[in-house]
Image: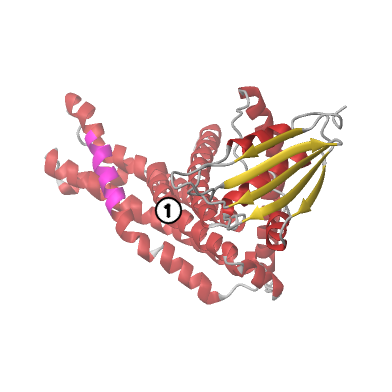
Amino acid sequence: MLGATRLRLTGRVAYDNGMESSPQVTADAVGGVWRVSVGGRWSLELPWPASADAALAGLADQRIQGLTLSASGLDSWDSSLLVFLVQLVRRARERKLKVTLDLPEGLTRLVDMAFAVPPRAGAERSATRGDVFEHIGAAALALPPRIADFLSFLGDVSIAVWNLIIGRSRMRPQDFITAMYECGVQSLPIISVTSMLFGLILAFVGAVQLTQFGAQIYVAGLVGIGMLRVMGAVMVGVVMSGRIGAAYAAFIGTMQVNEEIDALETLGISPVDFLVLPRMLALMFMVPLLTLYADLMGVLGGFLVGTCMLGLNPLEYIHATVHMVPYRQLVIGLVYGTLFGVVIAIAGCYQGMRCGRSAMAVGQTTTRAVVNSLVGIIVMTAIVTIICNVIGV
């Protein structure tokens, strides 16, 4: 029987000056109760007594049915004593032992506070890593809720558009005008540079092969069809994804962190009408116009290569561009641009509306918005291209 035996552990640290100013731990087991008494002076500067480890290890005895903590001759103490007592209590609770505290009032209150709030689930980092199939399964299980949430967001946007059509929308006209200025006029410099450079690159690439057959004039058709049909819209979409889509996600995400969107809902104002709708309409109107401008700058870049590098006559180059590029290529490019504007707006606003409540979440939301916009542009380009090929356009 445990009560028949008595185990006593005492730890002291002696210093050169002969003073016993050290942490003291006394532990004994009587009647199935592990009694631990602390005393002396506890400080982070003093070494941890060996008997403290023995007192912690004694709780592993399966014959122990309870824990009693007391203080005898306790001098000054700091957080080192609290750490020791919390470890004792935690190990006892893990074994579901009865814990009795016979400590000074301040020390008892601190120990109780240490266990007042349970640890948050998932707060600790896990050292284990699941296998590939586990990650695939977790991603597959998380996919349906995400799809349902995205469809719910699309439904809210559709309702907002319908309310705008019937004249019941809460969208402010000045927000729409401001959004058009931000994504349209302020984007002209970067669109000009990227589109002209892409036209130059496209003309150089074509000239490498065409000059071998003396067909330099076909550079005009190559650049014109390439820019007007798809590349002008794609370049605008990529630039707008990084510039406007990320800005929308960061702006709305910051409002989510600051609880401004919650305030709008409390006031009875729909965040979709107030934040999403004007930005989506602005991109739908401005991206096609920017696509026209990008087409013009791309053709201008090809014109510079054709006239300055290939020695073509300027009027001959313009005449070849007009005759080699049918107008339907321009219409197809505008369709691309309109769809890209919708994709960028929905991706940026959706990620902003679903942003977390921390500063780090805003950065993650911005990254996801750009990635989703680019993936959406590529997928939409593939779909429209296949449709055009099927119908023979």
Specify start and end residues of the magenta stretch as a single range: 193-204
Which corner quadrant of the image does residue 229 belong to?
top left
Q: Quadrant of residue 109?
A: bottom right
Horizontal arrangement in the rendering, residue 199 relative to residue 344 (left or right) = left
- Name the residue at 45% across, 56% down: 288
> Which residue is identified by label 1?
240
Q: Identify which residue is drawn at 45% across, 57% down.
A: 244
Answer yes or no: is residue 92 visible.
yes
Which kind of residue does numbered mark 1 sit on? Met
Residue drawn at point x = 18 percent, y = 41 percent: 306
Whole-percent x, y for residue 51 in the image: 63, 37
In magenta stretch: residue 199: yes
Tell me where residue 380 appears, x and y as whole percent. 53, 41
Q: Is residue 357 left or right of residue 199?
A: right
Residue reaching furthest to the front: 18
Q: Nearer the viewer, residue 193 or 214?
A: 193
- From this view, report whether residue 208 is shown above or below residue 330: above
Query: At numbered mark 1, what does the secondary structure look like: helix, strand or loop?
Result: helix
The front one of 48 and 314 is: 48
